[in-house]
Image: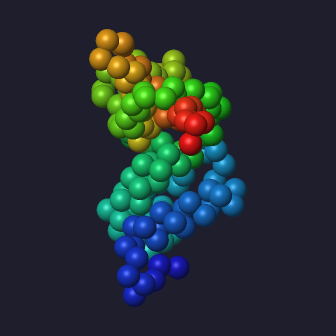
Amino acid sequence: MIDYSSGVPVYRQVASAIRDDITAGRYQPGAWLPSESQLAQLYEVGRDTIRDALAHLRAEGRITTVRKRGSMVATEPTREPYRVPVGVRVIARMPTPDERRDLATPGELREFGGMPAGVPVFEIAPGPRKHRKVLRGDHVELTFDDPPTNESD
């Protein structure tokens, strides 16, 4: 299963195998993955490699991890469209601890203590005199206005 001569890091191969299992439906959205120890035995690698693979999947938004409970397959949230006007700056970044708390749903606050790790935010910066807005990256789909065209060309 793991090809040590492929040149692809082992943790990426493990992450790819778990991702394939999620895509194939072996692990359903909301279902807990096997423990790190069980995954290490399954893929015949060390727990550090499993932790790196899970961190990679968390960064992709495929799983969420709850301390002392394990990792579960992320559910696909409904994304609301958000129209970004011309000239507005958008910054994609990871949230601050306060933003993780403030943007979390009540269920996430109970279960995770805030937004799950690995969920990015979009910072909408309209201009120097207007307030910035921070939106959850897993809840919005950004659409951008086209800049005006010069019809005299």
Query: Which quarter of the picture shows residue 94?
Result: top left
Query: Which quarter of the picture shows residue 8?
Result: bottom left
Residue 69 to residue 122: above or below: below
Residue 79 to residue 29: above or below: above
Residue lying at 30% horizontally and 26% vertically, measured from the top left: 97
Residue lying at 30% horizontally and 28% vertically, measured from the top left: 96
Q: Is residue 129 left or right of residue 4?
A: left
Find the residue positioned furthest to the front.
152
Toward the viewer: 81 or 24? 81
Residue 71 seen from this side: no
Percent across and percent down for residue 55 are 39, 53
Percent across and percent down for residue 114 are 41, 26
Toward the viewer: 69 or 105? 105
Q: How is the image coloured?
A: rainbow
Percent across and percent down for residue 27 are 63, 53
Residue 62 to residue 93: above or below: below
Toward the viewer: 119 or 152? 152
Residue 65 to residue 95: above or below: below
Percent across and percent down for residue 31 are 61, 45
